[in-house]
Image (spheres, rainbow, N blue to C red):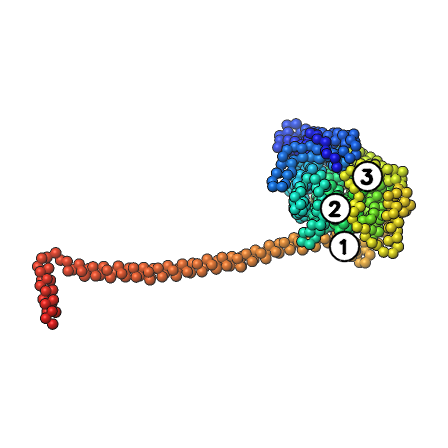
Amino acid sequence: MSDPIAVGYLRWIILAPLIGAAINGLLGTRIQKAAGKNAIAAIAIVPVLISFVLALNAFRQLLSLPADHRFLLDSVSRWIHVGHLRVDMAFWVDPLSAVMILVVTGIGGLIHLYSVGYMHEEPSFWRFFAYLNLFMAAMLTLVLGDSLLTLFVGWEGVGLCSYALIGFWYKEWANASAAAKAFLVNRVGDFGFIVGMFALFWGLDQTGQGTLVVREIAQRAHLLDGQLLWGIALPTFITMALFVGATGKSAQIPLYVWLPDAMAGPTPVSALIHAATMVTAGVYMIGRLNFLFSMAPATLHVIATIGVLTAFFAATIGVAQYDIKKVLAYSTVSQLGFMFIAMGVGAYSAGIFHLFTHAFFKACLFLGSGSVIHALHHEQDMRHMGGLRKYMPVTFSTFFVSTLAIAGMPPFAGFFSKDEILWQAFASPHGHWWIWLVGTITAGITAFYMFRQVFMVFFGEYRGAHGGHHDDAHGSHGAHHGHAVHHPHESPGIMTTPLIVLAAGAVLVGFLNVPGGLGGSHRFETWLAPVLEPAHEAPVHEPHGLVKKVEHAAEETLEHAEHDPLEYLLMVISVLVAGGGILLAWLMYVRGKIDPSFFSDAWAGVPYRTIFNKYYVDEIYEAVFVNGALGLSKMLAAFDRVIVDGIVNGVATLTRLVSQADGAFDKYVVDGIVNGVGAVTMWVGARARAVQTGHIYSYLYAIVIGFVVIMFARLL
């Protein structure tokens, strides 16, 4: 890695939205009253536009440099210099962070624009945009930080801002509860991140090379080889702990439960947090530290396994949901699982590419769902929709295109990125045939439930005006507004324009990484090559039988994968499986050839109810962790009350009794003796005082009597 090129403008990519957040946060009420909501919107959107322009400039500057010299550094100030730890406040742009800041500022800017229309009736308009700008600043800090400590500042910042944004309508219990859930679940993951970061510094410091600056870690990571912590190889321990943090931010098993509930927040928040920014933080972190994870093959195996299980698990839940945003939420969890599959098999570029394409089509889908909710007066239950393509042609067109992309249909963006992950899962030395198989099945399920959503929302007849109430344990957050009874309408241009731009991205951005087998040159992968290298060093698993032979053949031809017929075969299988999912959804929800109740009523409805209720994971967590924590607190309170307070109160009672006994002893014995001596002395004194009369003749009589007695005694 060459020395970075010093620049002075990267800080402003973060500071611009931070200033916007400060102005709206501190002066927003006055500005909104004096100049209106458009002034608030301008204060929020202009800084994001500035950040986007600066991000484009950084990208342009990188393009002008040789591949091995594409590193820009903006050193702001000295920060932490304690002992061997030397960390400055500095921001860093390389090919990876350049992709991230373009995604965050570009798609984030479109979401800001969309929010102007969506949130226009909100009284706290200024507060919403202050939070939105602050979130942008935190996310940009995360991806631009040149050290793990700076990254962690942004990591915690997006967690705090997500709490504020999810709970924006804090007066409603569902929103406040979802915000608290997101905050607490992420704290569990963040603890793992902290442990991993501290262990990393400790391991390097053992060799006299302690650092938390990412580019320095990359140069010194080999020093961790051979070190053990509690009998575990130190690189494995560090990466496992860091991965725990990633499962929290990026919603993987077992810490995914916060993300579906986060749909309680405003729809633009769902698009911003769950499409292009916060939920991709874990994927970005693994990509940023890919050199470290490549040293821990056991961790890579865990990542791939958790990723594929999360992808499949969340996809099955999405099949049975009726809330339009909940379907997209579980879709996000599933797609993040695909990204982790890529990271786990060492195909880091494929994972980042899917992150990139997913940002476009998922943001479009979330904003499209918001357009539907806006048109239907806050209705979110898909059973009260239908036929909306006649009323909302722009929303339908963009939603349909993005659904084709997420389903992995060619030539849309999701086809190129998801197919690359599935191919790498099968052919990579670090992949496995079963990961490819489960991933392919999941892709088919994704196509089914996403087109189920399209057909329920946009096809058939509109059911909102006469649809009855449906029992839905996971119904819409807008249910309190009542079902829509008016004719739907297309959203205003300020909301549909971002949809069009994002849908165009869902069509076009996939061509940035066309594989060689389809006539491309992996341009996106080539761009990231100076930062992301395949994990060649990890040991290869040893499958058995025919699978072993097939994988061995794939490994031998991996370097010439663009000409490997096996890649074409897997590509065709992937498309056919996705097409099968779409066909099944069409037969069920458009043609009516297959009754959905055939599946929902199978086996007495137990499988359907289990999936509909999200495998009862929330209930299990409630019983084990929440009620367990409450039970433990009650037990500790009882222990404190009975044992600790009993001991304290017993000691106090004993002390009181001893003090009472001591007081009685003092009163009756000590004081009695003292008072008795005093009384005897007074009695003797009184008697002796009687002798001292003051009369001379009395004294003479006493002398005579005494003399007589003495003489008489001597005579005897």
What residue occupies the far bottom of the structure in this picture?
A: 716
Which marked residue is nearer to the observer: mark 3 or mark 1?
A: 3
Instruction: Please tell me which residue is depicted at 64% across the width and 33% down the height of the picture.
Output: 77
- Of helix, strand and loop, which one carries label 1? helix
Q: Quadrant of residue 289?
A: top right
Which residue is pictured at 35% across the width and 59% down the height?
666
**Residue 674 horizontal side relative to residue 73, left or right:** left
Number of residues whose C-alpha sits closer than 10 Å to that of mark 2, classed few (under 14), some (14–19) or many (20 or more)? many
Q: Earlier in the sequence, mark 3 or mark 2?
A: 2
Q: Nearer the viewer, mark 2 or mark 1?
A: 2
Residue 293, labelled with which disc?
2
Residue 202 is situated, as x and y percent measured from the top left of the image, at 65, 46
For badge 2, the amino acid type reads Phe
- For badge 1, the amino acid type reads Thr
Give the Cα distance between marks 2 and 1.
36 Å
Q: Give the CA distance from mark 3 to mark 1.
A: 41 Å
Please state which of residues 109 and 510 is positioned toward the viewer in this rendering.
Answer: 510
Mark 3 and mark 2 in contact? Answer it, CB < 8 Å. Answer: no
The residue tagged 1 is 610
Q: Which mark is residue 418?
A: none
**Numbered tag placed on residue 525 in the rendering:** 3
